[in-house]
Amino acid sequence: MAYNVLLVDDSVTVRAVMTKTLKIAQIPLGELFTAGNGKEALDVLKEKWVDLVITDLNMPEMTGFELVDAMFVHEQYKAIPVIVVTTEGSTTRIDDLKKKGVRGYVRKPFTPEQIGEMITQVMGA
């Protein structure tokens, strides 16, 4: 099964690295959407079918924390699995995100194997 994935990060470079990482990790991709912040991500979610959201936390305009909050109060979006990929190391903040429904966490820098294992675990493949 191919997954439609939404990558959310304010860095164009990180989005490019993550795109390449998904291919190296042999994640079956359908469509790959990108957004530079949480607000752009919500716009994509309104228009496209997304199976998985991979998001950074620290972004301008709308952070990953705010994106997670918005997704998990919205009936249509709260079932979409979210994986956080960030430099954020606060276990308290990560625990709070997991309580809100975030299904996975990977700390930057990451390897393709880490990303592949996390997606496999979260998507149940």
Image (cartoon, rainbow, N blue to C red):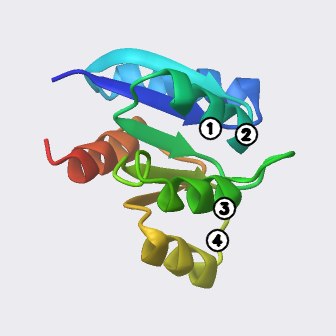
User: Which residue occupies 31% across, 39% down?
Assistant: 116
Decide which of tag 1 and tag 4 comes sooner along the chain: 1
Of the numbered discs in the image, which one, if any, rests on residue 89? 4
Q: Secondary structure at mark 4?
A: loop
87 vs 61, left or right, is left
Q: Residue 21 location in percent, x, y?
A: 45, 27
Q: What amino acid does circle 2 point to?
A: Lys
Depth check: give the residue in front, 110 or 60. 60
35 vs 24, left or right, is right
- Mark 1, residues whose alpha carbon is within 10 Å: few (<14), some, or many (≥20)? some
Q: Which residue is mark 1?
A: 42
CA gap, disc 3 and disc 4: 14 Å
Residue depth check, mark 3 versus mark 2: number of the one nearer the observer: 2
Decide which of tag 3 and tag 4 comes sooner along the chain: 3
CA gap, disc 2 and disc 4: 23 Å
Q: Secondary structure at mark 3?
A: helix
Q: Residue 91 location in percent, x, y?
A: 57, 81
CA gap, disc 2 and disc 1: 5 Å
User: Considering only vertical position in the picture, is 64 above or below 35?
Assistant: below
Depth check: give the residue in front, 110 or 57. 57
